[in-house]
Amino acid sequence: MGKPAITFSKLIDKLQQHYGPPAPLPSNDPLELIIWENIAYLASDNRRAEAFATLKQTIGTRPEQILAAQHSALAAIGKAGMLPDVSAEKLLTIAKIAYEEFESDLRATLKKPLPQAKKALKRFPSIGDPGAEKILLFTRSYPVMALDSNGLRVLCRVGFAEEQKNYSATYRLVQNAIHEQLPRECDSLIRAHQLLREHGQELCKRSKPRCAECPLSDRCNYIRKA
Ligand code: SF4
């Protein structure tokens, strides 16, 4: 694959010109971010936010509060997405791990060296390397460029790497391709994460991307090949 026709920073600037300031973060607390990921399976951001607000108002997000809750109350909140009983079970598992292994507070763990901090976060349901990196970034613990599937797709299509059959292989290729160009501090990386995600959701969708409306269309490999 040749080089992309746009630098990473220019790409992010163009997205901000198009979308405006990026969306605020759901939380800057590590445990709440883990709960956010698990609270409602395959729910939209809006539905997830509603479920999260309900949990905070009716039960709370501390491990002790979740462990004291009825399974049915957690499942009712999980109905914002699919498989609500599974989501309820995951919340209980999260609370149990946080309570038993981290004394209900993950903040000290995030101050550990990066590999150890990532390993600790991956103890929780649905948190792999990308999820752990996102938590480390959103809590401003480490300036790592976390990418979700939307951001990854955008960067592949623009031309930073060829999409592979294996998601992890694609993730690594893209990370290697952008590494030298990345800003070094968390706020800029958070802005990039949020804008890439928004672009993947709004215009650069998995099927039928809306290239005619895209601010990157004059620099995108995907549209050039099409
Ligand atoms: S031109 Fe199309 S494929 Fe390329 S980034 Fe924009 S929406 Fe995605």
Image (spheres, grey):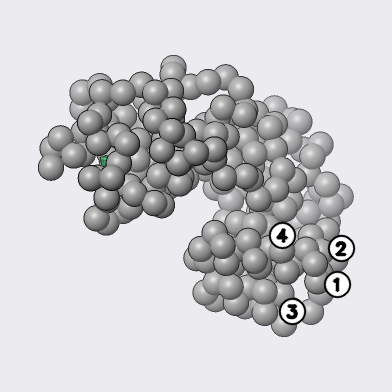
Q: Is residue 176 visible?
A: no
Tell me the quadrant of the picture where the C terminus can be found: top left
For the point 71% across and 74% down, the residue is 74
- Give the residue type that dot 4 points to: Ile
Residue 85 shows which numbered tag? none
- Give the residue type that dot 3 points to: Ala
- Give the residue type that dot 2 points to: Glu
Q: CA distance from mark 2 to mark 3?
A: 15 Å
Within 10 Å of disc 2 (Cα), the crowding (few <14, some 14-19, many 20+) is: some
Element on which disc 4 rests: helix
Question: Dot 4 corresponds to which residue?
Answer: 94
Question: Dot 2 corresponds to which residue?
Answer: 64
Q: State which tag comes first along the sequence, 2 or 3.
A: 2
Q: Which residue appears farthest toward the bottom when viewing the image? A: 72
Circle nearer the viewer, 2 or 3: 3
Q: CA distance from mark 2 to mark 4?
A: 11 Å
Circle nearer the viewer, 3 or 4: 3
Q: CA distance from mark 3 to mark 4?
A: 16 Å
Residue 157, x across and y down, in percent: 27, 38
Classify residue 45 as left or right of residue 52: left
Question: Dot 1 corresponds to which residue?
Answer: 68
For the point 32% across and 36% down, the residue is 215
Question: Dot 3 corresponds to which residue?
Answer: 73
Q: Which residue appears farthest toward the left when viewing the image? A: 226
Q: CA distance from mark 1 to mark 4?
A: 13 Å
Q: Is residue 124 visible?
A: yes
- Give the residue type that dot 1 points to: Ala
